[in-house]
Image (tube, rainbow, N blue to C red):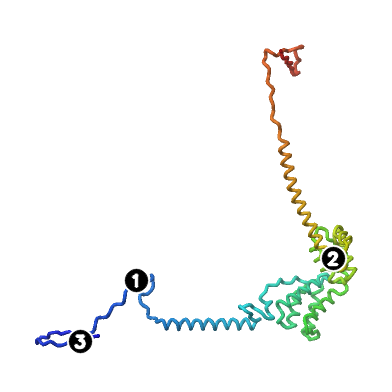
Amino acid sequence: MEYESKTETSTGSALPVYTSFPPTPPPQSSSPSPIGSPPHYNMSQLNLHEIIRQQQEQLAAMQAQIQALLAAQGGVGTGGAVTGPNVGSYMEVAKLAIFNGEAGRVGGFITACRLYIKMKLRGNTVEKQVQWVLTYVQRGSTDVWKENMMDELESGEAEYELVEEFLTCLRKEFGGGEEESVKAVELRKMEQGGKTMEEFIQEFKRAARGSRYKGRPLIEEFKRGMNGGIRRKLMEAENPPTSIEQWYRRATALDRNWRESRRKEERLRKKEGGGVQKQEQRTSLPRPLVWQRRQPLSQQVTMGPAPMEGVEKTNVVVLRG
């Protein structure tokens, strides 16, 4: 808008002069501006939305790259969980102990190899899996066998389509019939003793796995090794167990009940023993000493000859009525 103003010139004539209104100051905000914030912003709201959109697109692109990398290694499930055949590579697995050729340890060593290969080396070739197993075969007579095996693998004389074939060859080389005899001897020597039934059963299963004991002979060895009290209760039961699994299950239940009753009896004995001990302490307190009142000298009469030296003088007190 413009306004008209008449201004007199030097000649005295009035000429209209057009000027614009002065700029209107911005309204004062009632709330104080935050400390440290600039007083004016040059960024419009449209530009702010555009920057946020660009950042969201960059974040989505980064997430897609991460999922692609994980999918290439093992797959990504719902919520970013790693799935697929290589899921074991993200789990911690205990390393194997060195195998030195002992016949009694070959079974446990092969079992540990199978577990580790399944969890960690499933995607590797059979050659790498076999080489990994050979790194834990050391010491004793195994060094010469390992050297010969490496030569056969490099020359192509020994080829394995599956790592299980190599593990079977390892068992035959260091186990064979000797492993079965060792397991059978170990099984016949086993006794429960102070072990819980759960502990005894696990050790019994480990020894029985390579001993070829099955059916009735296996049950008889288990009956022989357990404690006599539990054995008698199971054999004298109305329906005694018939399979080895029934013997395992019912023997475990009896052993747990017996140990729980022993713990209850021990707690009750300690409780009763503490009360008896307190009662004995109360009854064994010494009685207070009672001093007899001495009679006055006027009422004491000394009778008989004077005592000899070294003999204690005895006073006889006579009470006068």
Lateral position of residue 47 relative to residue 245, left or right: left
Locate residue 23: give its quadrant.
bottom left
Depth check: give the residue in front, 288 or 70. Answer: 288
Checking the image for residue 247, the label placed there is 2
Task: Pick the quarter of the image with the C terminus.
Answer: top right
Q: Nearer the viewer, mark 2 or mark 1?
A: 1
- Residue type at numbered disc 3: Tyr
**Mark 2 Cα within 10 Å, few/some/many (few <14, many 20+)?**
some
The amino acid sitting under disc 1 is Ser
> How far is mark 3 from mark 2, CA to CA?
116 Å
N-term-proximal mark, 1 vs 3:
3
Q: Quadrant of residue 284?
A: top right
- The alpha-carbon separation of the residues under discs 2 and 1 comes to 87 Å
In the foreground, 181 or 230: 230
Vertical arrangement, residue 15 with respect to residue 269, above or below:
below
Task: Report which residue position mark 3 lands on.
Answer: 18
- Kind of residue indicated by mark 2: Trp
First in sequence: mark 3 vs mark 2: 3
Q: Are marks 2 and 1 in contact (CB under 8 Å)?
A: no
The residue singled out by tag 1 in the image is 30
Relative to residue 310, is residue 29 depicted above or below? below
